[in-house]
DNA sequence: ACTTGACCTGGAGCGCGCTCCAGCGGCTTC
DNA sequence: GAAGCCGCTGGAGCGCGCTCCAGGTCAAGT
C-alpha cells in the first residue's frame, strides 16, 4: 500500500536521490509521509503524481515549470484554467518539437541512404 | 561565397561562440579558413557540414558522438560502414525517443481533456 | 593619427538536472 | 551489543553545452 524510497525509485525508474531532490525542490504535491523511523513512505497518489511529472520532464518540460504546475495544483480548486493553459502550452511545444525532430530525421535518413547506396555499389564491385 | 563568423552564425541560427566552440572541440571537418587578418571565413562546405551536425545535435546526439562522426569523416575513405552504423544507431535512438514522447504526450493530452471537461461543466453551470 | 568595430584567444563561469558524499540514526540479526 | 543495512540531511560536486569576459589585433572610416 505504501513503498519505501528504494521501491518507489525502482517502480518509477528514477534514482532515490532524484526522488528526494524533486521533493526538496517543490515538485511534489506534499511532503511524502514518513514512517516512525522518519523514512519516506510513498502512497499511490504520490506515485501517480510523480509518474505524471516524469512524463512532463521526459517531454522536455523544465523543472521550474513542473514546479509552477505543482504550485497550481497544490493551490487547490480555482486555478484550473491556469493549469490547463500550462499543459496546453506544453502540448504545443512538444508537437512543435516532434515536427522539428522529424524534419531533421528525414535529412539524416537521406544521408544514411547515400552511404547505404555507396556501400552497396562497393559491395557489387568487390 | 564565404561568410564571416557573424554571418554564418546568423544563417545557421547559432551563436558565434558556439561556432568557435564547435571548431575548438573538433566537431568540424577542418579548421575554418582565415582571412589575412586571421578572421574565419566560412565556405559552403563548412556551412553544409555545420547544418548537418546541427540536425544531429537537435535530435539529441551528444557532442562527443558528433565528434566521433566528424573524426570518421575526416579520416577519409574506408570507414563508410562505421559512419553508416553510427548514423543508423542514431536513427534508431531518435525513433525510439519519438515513440516514447508520443506515449507521454497521449497521457498529457488525457489530462488536458479532463481539465477541459471540468472547465466546460463549470461554464455550463455558471 | 585616432576612433570604431568586428574578430581573435585562452580561460573562467554558468544554468540545468541531477548525483554523490560524510556523518548520523535506527531497526534487525546474530 | 556489535554488525549490517537502509534511510536521513545538508551540502558539495559533476557532466553537458554552451556563454561570457579581458585583453589584444587589425582594417576601415574621418
Image (cartoon, coloured by chain):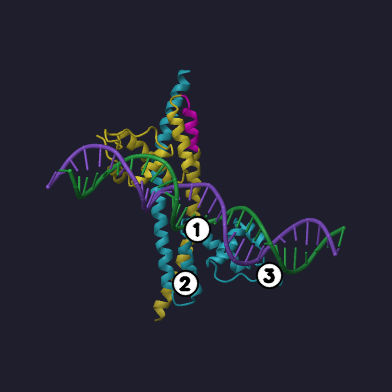
Chain colours: A cyan, B yellow, C green, D purple
| Mark 1 in CB contact with mark 3 (< 8 angstroms) | no
Mark positioned earlier in the residue sequence (1 or 2): 1
| Mark 3 in CB contact with mark 2 (< 8 angstroms) | no
Task: Give, as a single range, the part of the protein colored magenta.
Answer: B78-88
Q: Quadrant of residue A121?
A: top left
**Which chain hosts label 3?**
A
C-alpha separation, residue under disc 3 versus residue under disc 2: 28 Å
Residue B74, given in percent of the width and then of the height, sits at: 43, 29
Is residue A37 positioned above or below A108 on the image? Answer: below
Q: Quadrant of residue B43?
A: top left
Question: Is residue A125 on the magenta stretch?
Answer: no
Marks 3 and 2 belong to one chain: yes
**Which chain hosts label 1?**
A
Identify residue for label 3. A38
As helix, strand or loop, the secondary structure at mark 2 comes to helix
As helix, strand or loop, the secondary structure at mark 1 comes to helix
Image depth: mark 3 or mark 2 in front: 3
Is residue B114 positioned above or below A115 on the image? Answer: below
Q: Looking at the figure, which quarter contains the N terminus of chain A? A: bottom right
Residue A113, given in percent of the width and then of the height, sits at: 42, 33
Identify residue for label 2. A72
Identify residue for label 1. A57
Q: Is residue B63 left or right of residue A31?
A: left
- Could you tell me which residue is drawn at 64 percent across and 61 percent down? A8
Amino acid at each position: 500500500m505504501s513503498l519505501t524510497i528504494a521501491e518507489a525509485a525502482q517502480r518509477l525508474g528514477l534514482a532515490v536521490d532524484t526522488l528526494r531532490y524533486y521533493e526538496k525542490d517543490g515538485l511534489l504535491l506534499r511532503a511524502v509521509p514518513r514512517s516512525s523511523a522518519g523514512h519516506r513512505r510513498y502512497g499511490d497518489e504520490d506515485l501517480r503524481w510523480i509518474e505524471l511529472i516524469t512524463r512532463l520532464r521526459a517531454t522536455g518540460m523544465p523543472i521550474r515549470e513542473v514546479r509552477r504546475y505543482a504550485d497550481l495544483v497544490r493551490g487547490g480548486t480555482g486555478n484550473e484554467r491556469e493549469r490547463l493553459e500550462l499543459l496546453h502550452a506544453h502540448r504545443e511545444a512538444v508537437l512543435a518539437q516532434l515536427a522539428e525532430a522529424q524534419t531533421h530525421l528525414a535529412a539524416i535518413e537521406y544521408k544514411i541512404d547515400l552511404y547505404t547506396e555507396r556501400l552497396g555499389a562497393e559491395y557489387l564491385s568487390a
